[in-house]
Image (tube, coloured by chain):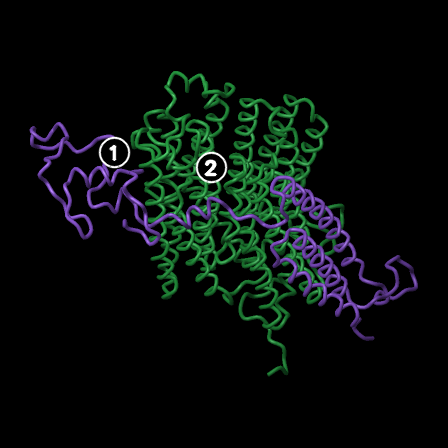
Chain colours: A purple, B green
Amino acid sequence: MSVNLTLLTVMGALYACGIYLILERSLTRVLLGLMLLANATNLLILATGGYAGLAPLFKKDTAAGDYSDPLPQALILTSIVISFAVTAFMLGIIYRTWVLARQDDIQDDAEDRRVAETPSFDAEDDAVIPAETSEFPLVAADPAEADGAPDPSDTVQAGARRMPAVDAAAEEQPGSRNITPAPEGGTE
Amino acid sequence: MNIASFAPLAVVLPILGAALTFLLIRQPRAQRTVSIALLSLTLLLECLLLASVWQGGTAAVNIGGWLPPWGIVLVVDQFSSLMLVVSSTVSLAVLVYATGQGMADGDRDAPVSIFHPTYLILVAGVSNAFLSGDLFNLYVGFEILLTASYVLMTLGGTGPRIRAGVTYVVVSVVSSLLFLIAIAMIYGATGTINMADLAVKLMDLDQGTRNLLHVLLLVAFGIKAAVFPLSFWLPDSYPTAPAPVTAVFAGLLTKVGVYAMVRTETLLFPGDTFNAPLMVAALLTMVVGILGALAQSDIKRLLSFTLVSHIGYMVFGLAMSSVAGLGAAVFYVAHHITIQTSLFLVTGLIERRAGSSSVDRIAGLAKLSPLLAVLFFVPAMNLAGIPPLSGFLGKLGLLQAGVSLGTPLAYALVAGGVLTSLLTLLAIARVWNRAFWRKPEDAEHPDPVLLAAPADAATGDRAGQRNVTLLPRTMVGSTLGLVLFGVALTVFAGPLFRVAGQSAEEMLDRSAYIHAVLGDEAPVPPIAQPLRQEGGK
């Protein structure tokens, strides 16, 4: 007996086309790719059942080796039903994508993009004068400074320049308009 | 008649419940009663199963009277019954939470009428996967739970959910196809798909074939369990789903993948062929996952990344293939299912109370709702592994097993485990500081709901919106119940560790499993090097 070469070649072709198609961004093509892959796998299961034989209906005078193996066919039947359900569901969500976005492509995750574009500069941790965000601000030991107004004559080193502490503190509050986060982090 | 013979009911009861709730689709109240009652019944049955296995040892049930290795067989051993009890407890809590949410919001808005049947089918799929003693039946269990999860993931069909659902469905289908290919090849190589029978017959294959089948199964389960580098789908798809759905997915679905990996490693392919690559994968999963978590500002996304990261601990325990390591991994799985689910449930509550789950938009919750703060704080510290909570005990067990193994790679994993634990604490502390501790005015983009006067918030009168209860009693109650269950895992850590250790011993020994399925006379092949084919090279 020989291996059924046609079946194996078809299986290989289906796998190749399927893998090519699921790498596309178009959802319809991805769906077609998944269907091809599922069918290729069904052929693979069929091939593992060995050579074709008699229908597996028990007769007294047939040797056990002459029957086809029925188990792979039962497995294929199950997997066909499953891939049918999944294909129907995929068609449903592809249609829904079309209704919602008027396009057939996979969409980017907006939150992912936002996180990727967030600068590494963090006003709370990286500022020269740390932003005070806790509910219990440090109370200065000197009662003269306890009202919270910084001495206007104080200056601080902010990056390359020297500036009054009052301005620096105002700049580095979170959400301040004066700070444009540069792409690599830090402030311009 | 042994109680273990009723094991199939753990799958049948939820499916029956799904059918009933589907018939009752127009009567939400009856639907809620039926689904909660049947799930409680299932949980009770599973507790009895755990007790019976604890005393009577591993038991197997032949479905439809077909004898193994031909028929489908369900196997109840200590590991699977422990997983069943923990998973059903968690899914019951989430079900109560979800019904509370449905009742508070009014059932007309979302298509929640299909929620109950789908959810019960998901539970049936999880039970089937845990019980299955047959590789193809395991595949069917996975498909049942995945198909239900596709529906739950895209519930309501909003833009973000559909976008996330597409990624999730495609990745899951590909991993299922890989699993199916592996099953086909295993059947081609050995002529059986009964797992106990395979444990015997796979030993006769030559090393190359065994490695191919082993890697195929590991890759398929690695995608499902979200092990690096196969984990990128998870943080992308989980956060957009409704809060109870994300919670149950985070708790259960990846753990079913871990369960399948444990079975593959201990029962089908014992020995240490792939221990080193698994350890490297575990290290990368832990570290890359937690670094991803540090960059997030949305709590749900952050928790999804910590979920990926902590899968690394379980793979680490598995890869040591020692009783201590595997036992700690089993304990860690039980702990992590509970804790991760409760954190996602609390995040759902935070989102309701504060209007958002992004830490840029919320602040001052410790003052606004001290109860929420406690509910978040306890499981969060547990996740980070602060003594004396169960997360600390599980990690301690893993690290001890790693040190006693003593190889350089094991020490690297121990260091990675400690680092990941510290970074988890950092990520969680950032959420705590920003969402709970700072003043509401300090939020970068405060949510209007958050800043509403407390009197308005209590009655749930959001400006211009219809009235909703912000923190319904059922939702808080179920979350509290799950948090307390997590604390109970800490209190009863001693007995639980013993159960985990015994189940690890049983799994590594393999004879209980093989004898339960194939009869007491079945030979148990030694775990030493498998036969190499004569006359090869």
Among the 4 quarters of the image, the one containing residue B458: top left
Cα distance, mark 2 to mark 1? 26 Å
In the rendering, at what x and y percent does residue A136 appear?
21, 30
Task: Depth check: give the residue in front, B322 or A6.
Answer: A6
Task: Depth check: give the residue in front, B35 or A6.
Answer: A6
Check disc 1 and report the residue beneath it: A134
Q: For marks 2 and 1, give the one nearer the viewer.
A: 1
Check disc 2 and report the residue beneath it: B344
Question: On the picture, is B216 further left or further right than A185?
Answer: right
Task: Look at the image and tell me whether residue B2 can be seen.
Answer: no
Residue drawn at (33%, 41%), measured in percent from left and top? B430
Q: Name the element at disc 2.
A: helix
Among the 4 quarters of the image, the one containing residue A50: bottom right
In the rendering, at what x and y percent does residue B509 appear?
53, 58
Query: In the image, is residue B153 above or below residue B290?
Result: above
Label 2 sits on what residue type? Phe
Task: Look at the image and tell me whether residue B400 can be seen.
Answer: yes
Residue drawn at (38%, 40%), measured in percent from left and top? B382
Chain for numbered disc 1? A
In the rendering, at what x and y percent does residue B125 appear?
64, 43
Label 1 sits on what residue type? Ser
Q: Name the element at disc 1.
A: loop
Instruction: Mark 2 vs mark 1: tell me if same chain.
Output: no
Among the 4 quarters of the image, the one containing residue A47: bottom right
In contact (CB < 8 Å): disc 2 and disc 1: no
